Image: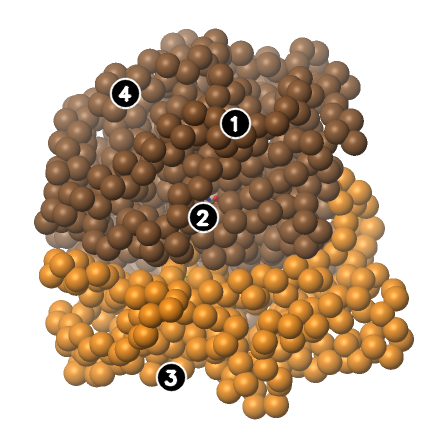
Amino acid sequence: MRITVHVWRQAGPQEPGKMVAYDLDNVNEHMSFLEMLDFLNESLIAKGEEPIAFDSDCREGICGMCSLVIDGIPHGPEKETTVCQLHMRHFHDGQEIFIEPWRAKSFPVLKDLIIDRSSLDRIQQAGGFISVNTGSAPDANNIPIGKEQADRAMDAAACIGCGACVAACKNASAMLFVGAKVSHLALLPQGQVEKKRRAIAMVEAMDAEGFGNCTNQYECEAACPKGISVEFIAKMNREYLGAQLSGRSS
Amino acid sequence: MNSVNKTLDSKVPGGPIEKQWELYREKMKLVAPSNRRKYKILVVGSGLAGASAASTLAELGYEVECFCFQDSPRRAHSIAAQGGINAAKNYQNDGDSIWRLFYDTVKGGDYRSREANVHRLSEISLQIIDQATAMGVPFAREYGGTLANRSFGGAQVSRTFYARGQTGQQLLLGCYAGLNRQIASGQVKMHNRTEMLDLVVVDGLARGIITRDLVTGEIQRHAGHAVVLATGGYVNVFFLSTNAMGSNVTASWRAHKRGAFFANPCFTQIHPTCIPQSGEFQSKLTLMSESLRNDGRVWVPIKPGDTRPPNEIPEQERDYYLERIYPSFGNLVPRDVASRAAKRVCDEGRGVGPLVGGERRGVYLDFKDAIQRHGKKVIEDRYGNLFEMYERITGESPYEVPMRIYPAPHYSMGGLWVDYGLMSNLEGLHVIGEANFSDHGANRLGASALMQGLADGYFILPNTIGNYLASKKPENISTDHPEFEKVENEVRAYIEKLLSINGDRSVDSFHMELGRILWNKCGMSRNKEGLLEALQEIPKLRKEFWENVRVLGEGETLNQSLEKAGRVADFLEFAELMCRDALEREESCGGHFREEYQTEEGEALRRDDVFSYVAAWEFTGVGVEPILHKENLTFENVALAVRSYK
Ligand SMILES: Cc1cc2nc3c(=O)[nH]c(=O)nc-3n(C[C@H](O)[C@H](O)[C@H](O)COP(=O)(O)OP(=O)(O)OC[C@H]3O[C@@H](n4cnc5c(N)ncnc54)[C@H](O)[C@@H]3O)c2cc1C
Ligand code: FES
């Protein structure tokens, strides 16, 4: 098929950016969206133009590296699908497609479609862990955890840290991302000891990074490629409030 | 020339095999806690091996710097592992033991691994599960609250722990959390989007690395008292593989060029259950977890060229070839055996699926019987996310039509040579995880790579590196040493050269062509003639690369073409060593199948009398014949036997 893509081009963090249109012929419906961009890049290189910079690594929907907004939707139109797993069969001949990077104050653009998401790492560093040194763990079966409980922790832990939730939110809030980690660990017995400190530290770090507030629009859940539920935001709010009420000492 | 130690002493401690690791730890030298902060360790890589090592070393009090090329350590390729992680916990009371895991791994590796290492790995497997659980890894559970297991990759016991189909993700996030704690405390300095481009060797000791900041292009020097490579595997040399786009051989290869021996490079694993290639534009292949083989039945039509849709082919016209040839293991034969069998039936013209490049390369993996036996709900519970993934990629539902699968390059058993302490022949350079030649011999069993990466990073290296450092004074090492300047200048010249060629062909086009050569001549099966041809073609292609590659843009900015170019340049050198190693090893074992050495039934023919050794290659120059060093393998605990799965 034949398509036209409009792509955000920006030479560097301080440079101005703009949308540039490219016509593409012979796009195969079995191509993934990123393979379509590879294909476009090969033609740009042949013409002596710099290829479009975009992030990807696993191309299996699990590493969280790919990060494109397609026609205004982070990861594009398919539900629970990262852009690396989106295939061209979902587009039609003659379609015009608009491709942009994640847009958020806390995710500055580095080049073209590549952004800086280190803010998400810093939130995790503030408390997204259980403080247990290597070698000091008891036998794993000494901590029984009900199947439902373990499954729910896994639902929260499935976050791939891509940041689509932030990109989808009009306030650029990272509540779903933080809620997922706070909930994952708060749902497990191992995570109890530090749960208050964790909730407060991660929420504070999120605010310090300049992410916005949650106004319950749930765009984040809709955009999440792993279907992480907004229930985890509610859970985090409870953890946070509980922690504040009882003081942050524990 | 750097002065490196050329004798291959594996430094396995003596004594009975079950006691060796204990004895090692009893005798090893220790660094006093108050002295540890005086030692700096550079850990390159943040996958399971690198992240677990970096955080554990930091917990012990060493100063650590860690590097990865992704934008966050959480995105290392380990994240993609699906199926699970082995441990000899025997929670299922089905007869598992440390000994049995050890035995299975040595046998599964087709008797080309070091017994002592494998035994240690089996012992440590128990602690890994405890550690990961304590870190909050949400492993699957039974209703009673205990951990669940499944049988995986042909094992006859259920020893595989898993977290849905995302075991690697959850284990890596556990390591990442531990790493974050150390980054927050200042004990680890993390360098994201930073690529190691060379190793600095000072007076025969690995003392530092040269990196490129992938955002700014800045070339930087880093000095340390030891360097740890945890940079993963190299099967992206085939261009199409199940590895992440960025996986590469650069760190290992450049260390090799500085004196580290490369062991068994021809041992690559071709995984039997991947989604077949759908066209020339394909950028990578997707693995379908082999747990699917627990319930799926593999078949092709009996008649060559039978293009009827699968549902129209009656039972009596189907060949369930794995069940037919290997009645006792059936669909669960090890990976190398399953992959070769698939290739054979496709070579016979019985492959299925669309024509790609004039051939049908695919076999069916059929769930119809399993759905009938257990009901759709049970199958959905077990494989729902995998079925969805398959449908997303192919547009076909495995509930309705059988999956199509075909083997794809997946894992590298070969890697930098290391001794029992995980140190390379180049002193101070340690290599862990998939990057070392390690414990899997000529074939890795399913769910054993995660185990090995974490054993290396959490439990082995943090001990053995102390033994090494204790023998070295924590002297001040400066990046002003002339050797740093020299290596940095070489890196700069290399980058300038890549950018200045400005030829006609893209980097990818070279990578694709290299991949084709290797897949055809050093892939699932190899022969002398093909390997000799490849050894002619690769240097030619490499020459063309250096004359005709087009790398646009500049060095001082984010430049993905330049990143790729450097990696492909290294693959172009490495590929030659792979073929040479395959040529030299005149036997078939595990993933290395030499057509000249097979039994009458077409099974691998090992030649223990001549090839019971690790081939460790010494670099002597690009395009120059390398020197082969051998580490002889002895099997005192597991008797050498023909691997039979019939
Ligand atoms: C699709 C798939 C599924 C798998 N499933 C399983 C499974 O179920 N069970 C199992 O046991 N094994 C599985 N494996 C194998 C297993 O995942 C890997 O062998 C293992 O995770 C490798 O871990 P690692 O830490 O050695 O390297 P990796 O996770 O590959 O990490 C490499 C690290 O090195 C960094 N790096 C590389 N080069 C450089 C450089 N030059 N400079 C700076 N940094 C660099 C990268 O950024 C990364 O952080 C699977 C593999 C694949 C491909
Ligand atoms: S590239 Fe890994 S999730 Fe898309």
Report helix, strand or loop for mark 1.
strand
Q: Is residue B408 above or below residue B164?
A: above
Front-most of B163 and A133? Answer: A133
Q: In the rendered structure, are the residues bearing label 1 and label 3 in contact, judged by CB atoms less than 8 Å apart?
A: no
Q: Which residue is mark 1?
A: B207
Question: Do the residues at pointers 2 and 3 share their chain?
Answer: no
The image shows residue B619 at horizontal and vertical percentages of 34, 20
Question: Do the residues at pointers 4 and 1 share their chain?
Answer: yes
The picture quadrant where one finds residue B341 is top left
Under 8 Å from ligand 1: the CB of mark 2? yes
Alpha-carbon neighbours of circle 4 within 10 Å: few (<14), some, or many (≥20)? few
Alpha-carbon neighbours of circle 2 within 10 Å: few (<14), some, or many (≥20)? many
Decide if residue B601 is on the left or right side of residue A224: left
- The circle on residue B194 is 2
- The circle on residue B621 is 4
Answer with mark 2 or mark 1, whichever residue precedes in sequence. 2
The N terminus of chain A is located in which quarter? bottom left
Q: Which residue is mark 3?
A: A72
Q: Chain of mark 2?
A: B
Q: CA distance from mark 2 to mark 1?
A: 18 Å
Colour representing chain B:
brown
Q: Is residue B393 above or below residue B576?
A: below
Residue B14 visible? The answer is yes
Question: Do the residues at pointers 1 and 3 share their chain?
Answer: no
Front-most of B14 and B635? Answer: B14
- The circle on residue B327 is none
Answer with mark 2 or mark 4, whichever residue precedes in sequence. 2
